[in-house]
Amino acid sequence: MCEAHGRTLHHAAIAVSDRASAASHGRAGGARPRALHPAASPRAGGDRVAAGAVGRRQVLDVPADPVLGRLLVAGGSAGRCRCADDGRWSTSACTELARGAGRRYLRRAREAHMSSPKQLAICAIGAVCIAGAFASLARADARPTDTYLDQTRERWEKVAKQIWDTPELGLGENRSSAALIDILQKEGFQVTKGVGGEATAFVATAGSGAPVIALLAEYDALPGLSQAAGQSRKQAVTDGAPGHGCGHNLLGTASVAAAIAANRERVAKKLPGTIQLFGTPAEEILFGKTFMIRGGAFKNTEAVLAWHPDDQNRVTNRTRLAVAAINVEFLGRSAHAAASPWLGRSALDALTLFDHAVALMREHIKPTARMHRAIRDGGMAPNIIPDHAMGEYWVRDVSVDSVNEMLERLRKAADGAALGTETKARVTLTFQTREPMPNDVLNTVLQKELDRVGPPRFDDTDQRFAKAMQKELGFEEAGMASAVMPFAQKNGGTASSDIGEVSAVVPLAELNTATRPLGTAAHHWAQTACAAHPVGYKGMAVAAKVLAAGA
C-alpha cells in the first residue's frame, strides 16, 4: 500500500464509484497433436504478438549532462536509451545498457591506444561511472515494496516450489492453503478459515479502516498434468497425477508475497487502510469464489487486484469469457447387446446423437464463442445396451446473455436426441460464471506499475530453454516475451474464471506476466514444467511487484 501515483489508495477509492454499474450488471501446420486449453484459439499456439514487439517504456526526466553525453557517444549508446516519443531518458532502456555502455567505452579506449596504466585506469573509472549513472536512473522510480520483494526472492521461489511439489485438485488444496496461511499468520495477518463453507478457502487481513484493498490467491492444480520441472519435453513425474498446468503455485505465492510487501509498507509509513488476501480454492472448476461471495467474503472490500500466469506481459480490459457448464444425461433401457438388442434403448446412442448435433452447431455460433465437452459415462460393458450415459458440456462467450442463448440451444438438441432414440434427456446446470467487468481506473494503476517494473528479465539460459520447448511443440522458436504490451480494449483471452463473479460485486483489475514460452498454452504440461523453473519464478516476481505497488 505505497504512495505511488499520488497514492494508489486514492485511485482505488475512486474505483468504488463504479459499484453502481457493477450492481446493474446481469447475474445469473505440421505441429504434432498436443493438449491445449479448450477455450484458447483453436489455431496452434493461438494469436499472439511477435516476440520482438515493443512495449511501453517508463521514462524519467533528468538534466542534460554534457560529460555523460560524451561518454554515451563514446560508448555507442547515445539515443538508444531515450524514449522515441519525446527524447527523455528511458529507465527500461537504461537498465539494459547500464553494464554494456561501460564495457563498450573501455573497449573503444583500448582501441584508441590508451595503453598506459594511468589512461586505462581513468577509462575503467569512467566505465564504472557510466554503469552507475544508468543504474541510478533505473532505480530512481523503484518502490520500497520492490526492494522487499527483491530481498526475499528466494523465499518466494521456495514457497512456489513447495506448492508445486504437492499439487492438489480443487477443494482438496489442504497442504497448499495451509502453507500460505502459515506464512500470513507469521507476518501478522489475521486469518479466517473455511470461508463460504469451503475448507480450503480463507481470508487474511491486516490493518483496519478504509480503504480496503484485496489481492486474490489461487493454488489448485489440474488433473493429469504432472510434469518434471524444467524439462522441455513431456515427462511426467507420476503418470496421470495432477500438476500445476495453469501455474497456480506461482499465482498464489505472488499474491501472498505482494500482500505482505504492501502491508509492510503500510505499517512503515503509518498509512490508513486494510490489506486483504483472499485464498480462493477450486478456480479450475469455477465456483470457489462464488461460494465465498455467497458467504459475504467481499462485502467490505473496495477494490481487488489479481494476476494470472501467461505467455505475455499485459493488462487486459476484457480478461475472460462468461461460462456455463451442464451435465447432459440420457436414460434408456438395458438389454443384452447380442441376444435381444431390440429390447433395449441405448442411452449412449442418444448421447452420440446429441454430441454430433453440438459439433454441427459450432458452425452456427459466434466467433467469440467456445463449446467443449468430456464424456463422463458411456456404459459399463460392450455387451450391455447402456441405460445411462452422460457428458459434461461447457459453453463460453463474451457475455452471460450469449451463454444463456447457447444453453437453450443445447437443451433443444438434447430433447431432439432423446426423441430420436426413444430415451429421456436430463439437463442439469452445474455452474455459471459471468464475464469480468472492466474497471479503467484500476486497469490504469496496474498498467502504470507494469510499465514501471518492466517485463521479466530472461537471460540466455531461459531463452534457450523456451526455444527448446517451442521446437518440441512445433511452434516458432520465439523464446520468452521480452516486452510489456500496450494496454488495449478487449486485449484479453478466451478462458474463463470465477473472478467474473468477484468483479460483479467489487471493482477488479487483472494483469498477466510471462511464465511460459510465447505461443504455449495453459492447461498443458509446458506450463507445469515452467511453474518450477526460473522462467516461471521471474514472471511471478514481476507480478508480485506490480500487485504490491498497485495496492
Image (cartoon, rainbow, N blue to C red):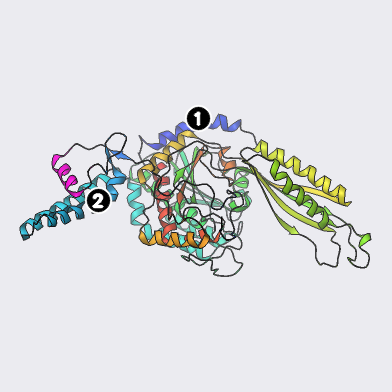
The mark lying in front, picked from 2 and 1, is: 2
Q: Secondary structure at mark 2?
A: helix
Where residue 257 sits in the image (x, y, percent)? 42, 53
Q: Amino acid at mark 1?
A: Ser
Q: Is residue 346 above or below residue 296?
A: below
Residue that label 2 marks: 98
Where is residue 436 drawn, in percent x and y?
57, 40
- How many marks are shown on the rendered structure? 2
Q: Quadrant of residue 337?
A: bottom right
* Magenta-drawn stretch contains 53: no
Q: Say whether residue 381 is left or right of residue 248.
A: right
Q: Position of residue 525 (x, y in %)?
A: 54, 61
Front residue of 295/491: it is 491
Determine whether, in the image, residue 215 is placed left or right of residue 59.
Answer: right
The label shown at residue 254 is: none
| Crowd around label 1: few <14 · some 14–19 · many ≥20 (10 Å) | few
Q: Which residue in the rendered view is the most extreme toward the front? A: 30
- Which of disc 1 and disc 2 is earlier in sequence? 1
Q: Nearer the viewer, residue 182 or 18?
A: 18
State which quarter of the image contains the C terminus: top left
Could you tell me which residue is drawn at 45 percent across and 44 percent down? 314
Q: Which residues are magenta?
A: 61-78
Q: Residue at x 43, y 48 (%)?
A: 259
Quarter containing the N terminus: top left
Q: What is the distance, in whole Å, between disc 2 and disc 1 at their CAs?
A: 43 Å
List x then y, in percent, for residue 430: 71, 48
Q: Secondary structure at mark 1?
A: helix
- Residue 17's label in the rendered image is 1
Question: Visible in this render: residue 341?
Answer: yes
Query: Which corner quadrant of the image does residue 62 belong to?
Result: top left
